[in-house]
Amino acid sequence: MLPDGSSAPRLPGFRLWLWDTEFCGSIGLRWQPDTSELPPHVLGHIGYAVVPWKEGRGYAKLALKLMLEHARAQGLEYVEITTDPNNVASRRVIEASGGVLIERFQRPAQYGGTDAVRYRITL
C-alpha cells in the first residue's frame, strides 16, 4: 500500500531493528530480483530511522554499513537512497557510506510531491 492509499506489487525485502539495550530504530532493504533497478513507485532500496533520543550516536551510519553487506549478498550492483534535501544528518550518513548525489527531484504525487534528493552507493 502506497502513502496515498493506492497499491503496487510488493518487492522482496526485509527490515532489521537497531538495538543497543533498547530499541533505537530500524533499517530496511528492498530490491527487484535480477536487477539493481527499482520500479518507479519505489523511491529507494534502503530506508532507515533512528528514534530521536538515540540520534547522533552513529547508529544510522553503522546500520547502513551493515545493510550494504546484505545488498551485496542479494547481488545488487548499487543501492539508491532518497531523503529530504534539508535532512543534513541523513545526507551525512549516506555520504559517509560512499553515497554520491545523483539528482534532485519531486516525489511522485502518491508520496506528496515534495522535494527530495537521490543518492547512489556503488557496491
Image (cartoon, rainbow, N blue to C red):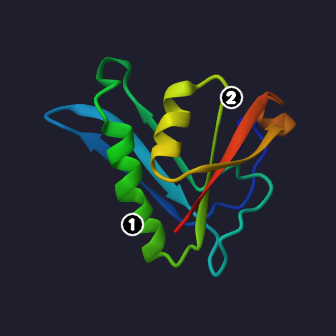
Residue farthest along the bottom direction in this orientation? 34
Residue where numbered disc 2 is placed: 85
Place of residue 121 in the rendered image (x, y in percent of width and height, measured from the top left): 57, 58
For numbered disc 1, what is the local secondary structure? helix
- Across and down, in percent, residue 108 comes to 84, 40
- Which quadrant of the figure has residue 6? top right
Q: Residue 86 appears at what percent x and percent y?
A: 64, 22
> Total label count?
2
- The vertical placement of 42 against 6, above or below, is below
- Taking depth in this image into account, of 72 and 88 the one nearest to the observer is 88
Q: Which residue is mark 1?
A: 69
Q: Nearer the viewer, residue 54 or 2?
A: 54
Question: Local crowd at mark 1 within 10 Å, few (<14), some, or many (≥20)?
Answer: few
Give the x, y percent position of residue 11.
Answer: 62, 64
Structural distance between the alpha carbons of marks 2 and 1? 26 Å
The amino acid type of the residue labelled 2 equals Pro
Horizontal side, residue 107 vs residue 38: left or right:
right
Residue 49 disc label? none
31 is higher (above) or lower (below) than 53: below
* Crowding near the residue tagged with mark 2, few <14, some 14–19, many ≥20 C-alpha atoms within 10 Å: some
- Residue 50 image-quadrant placement: top left
Q: Earlier in the sequence, mark 2 or mark 1?
A: 1
What amino acid is at disc 1? Glu
State the residue at coordinates (43%, 76%): 73
**Does residue 53 sit above or below 32 in this rendering?**
above
Q: Residue at x 37, y 25 (%)?
A: 51
- Position of residue 63 in the picture relative to residue 49 (left or right): left
